[in-house]
Amino acid sequence: REEKSHAETSHNMDDLVDLLDSDDDITPKSNESSVCVQQRNEKMFDKQNEAEEEKENSKRAEILMKKKKSSSSLSKVMEEEEGEGEDKESDINANVDDEETVSMLKRGTLVADPLDPKNWEAYSPKSSDEGERRDAFTSLNADDEYFRRTGGTKPLPPPKETTRVVENTRLGRATLKQEVLDSSNFSNSEKHSVATTVVETISQRTIRYPEQDMIAAQMNIPNPGVSSPPRPSSLEKGCMKPTTSFMKLSIEENPTPQTIPPPIYGDQGNIGEKHVLVMVGLPARGKTHMAKRLCQYLRFFHGANTKVFNVGEYRRKVYGAGKMTHVLFDSQHEKEREVLARAAMKDMIDFLFQEDSVSYLEQRGVDSGRVAIFDATNSTKARRQWLVDQMGPLPVKLLFVESICNDDDIITNNIWEAKVTNADYATNEDKQAVFNDFRQRIREYERRYETMDEDNLSFIKLIDCGKRVEINRIHGYLLGRIVQFLSNLHAHTTSIYLTRHGQSEYNASGKIGGDSCLTAMGEAYAKRLGDYANEVIGRDPETNKPQPVRLWTSALQRTQLTARHIPHPKILTSDGKIWTQMAPRVLRNLDEIYAGICDGMTYEEIKEAYPEEYLLRQENKLGYRYPRGESYLDVISRLDPLIQELESYREPVVIVGHQGVLRLIYAYFVGMDRTSASQGVIPLNTIIKLTPRTHDCIEERICLYNPADDKDLVPSDNETSLSYASIADPPSY
């Protein structure tokens, strides 16, 4: 047996099919080039068993004798040749021996299944067009004569520069096929057409299993080929219509599609389920503060339709604002208060069971049910039993939330911050008299107050602003989230400082996403932020002494570079502990919304490259998800645990983040609806100070840096400081 170099040796498709049935490992390795795969495959062919070659030699002589005696067609001879071999089963699978099937293949009415191993070669990366697909099937022994007789066209020859005719000295099928041609009565042109069936391009026809593409993608392995195409049945029938980013099925192919996608984390909940939360506790215990914060949390992070029904608001409508005294809360006015409670109860039931303004299908995408909060003292067991009797026959889940506070300092602080300025005393300018009257109101309730101990009811009991929490008969997902959120609330007033990173290189060029560094203007703002955090945020506004402050940044380098100039001295807290001032905490949950395939593009480039995606985002900015990226609803989901942690802190927090993420945090604390949250404006070079309170949120914006006024700013070539100002904050759509 004469051995030849790899450059002179190639193998036809029949040998490749045989190799698929062998136990040899022919799977391309990671980072392996197609040339290496070719060389390794050719070595495997040279290891053929000598005994098998001798059998083929003897078979060749027998078949040639049969050919001389037979008047059958060339295709019949080749079928007989394959049937006589020991590898009969694999060759029959590869052979297109049915005339009707071959005819359907050529007319395009029948398409080979790409999941069938014998047809994988037809869908190889280099056999995508019509001519090469025919060539692939021809190499599976669907001979040229068969195609010619059934109305097909001859397969196109492969490119000359990448092909070579098989030259194999061993007596195998390639040599056998050539001798059959020589002994047949074919013209030169017909011989040439049949000879093209043994022309192979090994370097292009690297054997790949369809599942290899999936494995390579998961393991970040370089993919030397292209993934298998989708099943062509729908494509051939004209049922699939390509768009800019995906394939759509026609109504014939998918007559009843799913119209609403499954809910994401931010929309979880039972559709149409009703919850009623009843606040319990003495005045000035933070019940209204809890009710309003919980109402905003469930609406913003869980998509629930929520509303607070405060009995005090009904009382002010009847008696008028500014005319409340403690006399109205003694035992002699119990009937009047019961009438007010019934009015609030009626409106609450109407809210829970009113028809939605949107259809059920539309509601499925945005609604996690309805939650009504009944805000009153409900201080006696008789009043709570009345509530149970009213709500018992209705399909609702009932949860009592009791707030108990034994710390007189907290109670006094709550009265001064939330009660002396509320609508009950709007016309009374003597704040000390208001304070004394409210204290007398508390004493009236204390005479008949009964704490919750009804074991048959579901309740959560918060003692001293969450220092101790008791729960009873809590079941269900949403009730569990409510318990977790309330456990993090406290009655202290603290501030949150929101700031975007300094201008990044992508900001300057109008690109979205990325992980770029800061420009000269961004670095200038970072230094100003460090000075402001040290001199203003880090000091108590009343005593001017250092106060503990926390610092959060995202995991992207532009936020960390912006915060790196903030000093971190060690200070002594009021309780004698050592505190590292504004120690940076890096949180991936604060990363900017991921734009997927649009990451690093400008909005103009997105509009040009993906016009359909651009329009979809314009129509629904909140729910739109970038291809392979995120939506604002996805970001809301990952911000949920951070918001609960923010609610638990009693120290000021500085957050250096990104516009998309800060929009959502800002919207939550100021009480905006999440449908309008994505339209908020968070400018560069500015700190937004938020101080949430029971009935409102104080907002203050401080511009720390104006690049147009910075004489020390060194612009790049052909730029001025004024041009820096013009690109300080590119438009956000």
Image: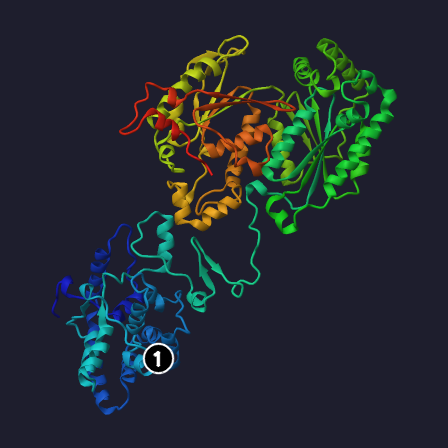
**Left or right: 380, with 49 as reference point:** right
**Left or right: 236, with 641 as reference point:** left
Foreground: 36 or 621? Answer: 621
Foreground: 174 or 524? Answer: 524
Q: Quadrant of residue 185?
A: bottom left
Residue visible at 73% across and 39% down in the picture? 351
Q: Quadrant of residue 673?
A: top right
Percent across and percent down for residue 543 are 53, 8
Residue visible at 57% across and 39% down in the picture? 675
Percent across and percent down for residue 242 are 43, 59
Percent across and percent down for residue 353 are 74, 43
**Left or right: 34, with 462 as reference point:** left
Q: Is residue 379 visible?
A: no
Percent across and percent down for residue 655 are 47, 25
Is disc 1 placed on a helix, strand or loop? Answer: loop
Query: Which residue is label 1 attached to?
Result: 97
Q: Quadrant of residue 25?
A: bottom left
**Picture mark count:** 1
Tell me the colour scheme of the image: rainbow
**Amino acid carrying mark 1 in the image:** Asp
For the N terminus, the image quarter is bottom left
- Crowdedness near tag 1: few (<14), some (14–19) or many (≥20) residues, C-alpha within 10 Å: some
**As drawn, 157 above or below 704:** below
Q: Is residue 589 visible?
A: yes
Residue visible at 41% across and 27% down in the picture? 501
Foreground: 339 or 287? Answer: 339
**As drawn, 3 above or below 485:** below
